[in-house]
Image: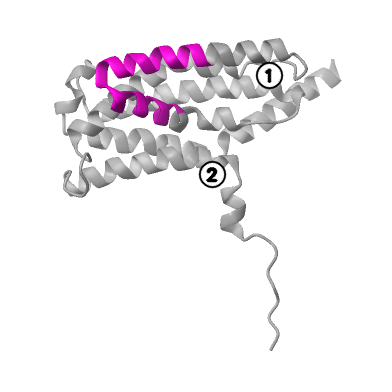
Amino acid sequence: MAYKTITQPDAIQEAARSPRFWATLSPLLLAVSFLFALVFQGGLLPGMNAEALGSVMQVELVVLIAGAFMVIPVTAPVRPDNRVGKTLQWIVFTAFFVHFARMAWTAYGPWGTLSFAVLTWATYGGALLRRGPPERGATRWIVAALRWVVAIAAFVIAISIADLPASSSWWTSEPNILPAGVVYFGILASVEASGVFIWLEDNLFDLGMRSKTSA
């Protein structure tokens, strides 16, 4: 009996090739880590406790502050043939990344710098992965800025729901930091998985094109 060879990638392979998949994966894994620490009370794996994950949320606060200096400039619309502009964008991104990574190192050592790098990707990966035709540069930049605003709003919501102290220096001693992490990274993962940013980019671009046509 002959069997037909399946040459088309299945749904999982297709999803794995999608930028949305990779943008969703990192915050989802972080949300699951906080959830496991909450359910198992830090007894599942070393480092999965309120103290360690509280420091992750402290570093995430630095990542949110850094977003205004790193991600928004590097996603600003620059013509593809403007190599100087593109180079300057990545120089600015790298300079601020190193600056804030050093801040994390000073506060938390190598673990802080590693956390800063991972959290930068988890928070802004969707914006950094987006590529497309040059004429969409302005809409991609607007949506990248919106990602930053949504992340800040999600963070405020999570901290408020968990009733955490206003000073982040106390978060490592607060058991409620675990549900806060679940809520925060869960929101980021859900928003990325929904494709709402891609939808907004498409519709903002179409709206801009219709405005130019009617003008």
Measured from the top left, where is residue 7 in percent x and y?
Answer: 70, 65
Q: Which mark is residue 138?
A: 1
Quarter assignment of residue 164: top left
Left or right: residue 50 versus residue 113 is left
Left or right: residue 203 versus residue 119 is right
Colouring scheme, one of rainbow, by chain, secondary structure, one colour: one colour
The residue sitting at 40% across, 29% down in the picture is 119
The residue carrying mark 2 is 21
* Helix, strand or loop under label 1: helix
Measured from the top left, where is residue 138 in percent x and y?
Answer: 68, 19
The residue sitting at 67% across, 22% down in the picture is 139
Category of crowding for the residue at label 2, using alpha-carbon neighbours closer than 10 angstroms: few (below 14), some (14–19), many (at least 20):
some
* Magenta span includes 107: yes
Amino acid type at mark 2: Phe
The mark lying in front, picked from 2 and 1, is 2
Left or right: residue 134 versus residue 188 is right
Q: Is residue 135 visible?
A: yes
Q: Quadrant of the C terminus?
A: top right
Quarter assignment of residue 49: top left
* Magenta span includes 23: no
Report the span colored magenta. Answer: 94-120
Secondary structure character of the magenta stretch overall? helix
Q: Is residue 176 visible?
A: no
Measured from the top left, where is residue 69 in percent x and y?
Answer: 49, 12
Q: Which mark is residue 25?
A: none
Amino acid type at mark 1: Ala
Q: Is residue 16 above or below residue 152?
A: below
| Cα–Cα span, label 2 and label 1 | 23 Å
The residue sitting at 20% across, 50% down in the picture is 44
* Helix, strand or loop under label 2: helix
Measured from the top left, where is residue 67 in percent x and y?
Answer: 46, 18
